[in-house]
Structures are given as C-alpha cells and as structure tokens.
Amino acid sequence: MSAQAGFRNAVTSAPSWRRRNLIRGSKIPYTILRATQFFEFVGGIVDSSSDGQIVRLSPALFQPVASDDVAAALADVTLGARLTASSSWPAPEKCSLDEFGRKYLIATNDPRRVAADIHARYFGAELDDQSLTPVNNPRLGSLRFEDWLGKPRK
C-alpha cells in the first residue's frame, strides 16, 4: 500500500476531529470545507423541538446554509487549488434559532407556535450564540432563508 493510500485509509476511519488533525499535520495540500447546518434541516429541528402545539427553540444565533450553496462551494474547492486551510460556508444571514423556526412554520402554514427558551435543547445540548455560527471570516452562501422557503421543493 502506498503512503498516500495508507494516509487516506487512516483519515477516513478516524473521528472527524482526528481526521482534521491528521490532514492538517500531513504534507499533502488540502482544503477543508466546513458547512453550517443546512436549511433543509430546519423542519426536522422544529419537529424534534415540538411538544404538541408549542415548539421550544433556543434564541441562540443560528446561521444555516442552503445545500445548493454548499454543493457549489464544494465544486469550487474540488476543482480549485488546495488552500491548505479550512473554510466555513454559512448563509449570508444569521438570526436566532427560534426566529428561523417561526419563519419555517409560517412558510409551511403550520399552526404550531414557537416559544423562545434559553434552556431549550438542540439535540441534547444547550446553545449559546457561538454554538451554531461560524468563526474566522467565513465565505458566505448566496441564498437567503426566505428565498429558499419560497422555492419549490423536489
């Protein structure tokens, strides 16, 4: 097995934090594209936070991105020169998770109400404003959540 094949096998079988460290420590040029949550997940987040007619969501900042924007960014990264760096890819806007939930429910004509709750869990974790937003000057996607909500679904 070649050194490069061995490295690839080690990287693909390791946990994500270990993969990033293995990649960063190698001599192979790389680019890591880190995307925030996808717009497509907002419905599932709302449903998992629902207790009957009330959806309890954190008011922590949230900055999801359209999967189409991530696919375009991934194509650019794949075809471009390796940056030997990481890049985050969120949407051009951020607002509170509870506000994203409200916008989603309105757009889908869902009668449930959203209650902002600083102790609401996000898949088991309590959030703050840095939990679901990128750091270090991210490249921004182009599609806004409201525009995504208005697009027909496949």
Image (spheres, rainbow, N blue to C red):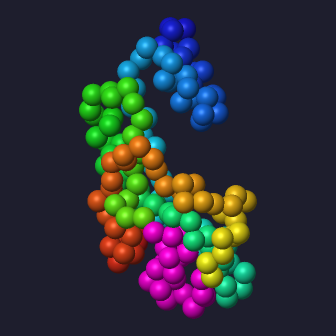
Instruction: Kindly identify the residue that appears in the image at 45 percent across and 69 percent down.
Output: 95
Visible residue check, residue 12: no
Could you tell me residue 108's position as x and y percent? Answer: 48, 83
Query: In the rendered image of this protein, does residue 130 appear above or below residue 107?
Result: above
Choose between 20 and 3: the one closer to the eye. 20
Q: Quadrant of residue 10?
A: top right
Instruction: Kindly identify the residue that appears in the image at 33 percent across and 48 percent down.
Output: 139
Span colored in magenta: 95-114
Query: Does residue 39 appear left or right of residue 147 in this picture?
Result: right
Figure quadrant of the C terminus: bottom left
Could you tell me residue 48's position as x and y percent? Answer: 67, 70
Q: Is residue 78 magenta?
A: no
How many numbered circles does the render carry?
Answer: 0
Instruction: Kindly identify the residue that appears in the image at 55 percent across and 22 percent down.
Output: 22
Figure quadrant of the N terminus: top right
Q: Is residue 110 magenta?
A: yes
Furthest residue toward bottom: 111
Query: In the rendered image of this protein, does residue 98 appear above or below residue 87?
Result: below
Could you tell me residue 141's position as x and y percent? Answer: 33, 56
Instruction: Kindly identify the residue that appears in the image at 41 percent across and 59 percent down.
Output: 65
Query: Does residue 49 appear left or right of residue 99 in this picture?
Result: right
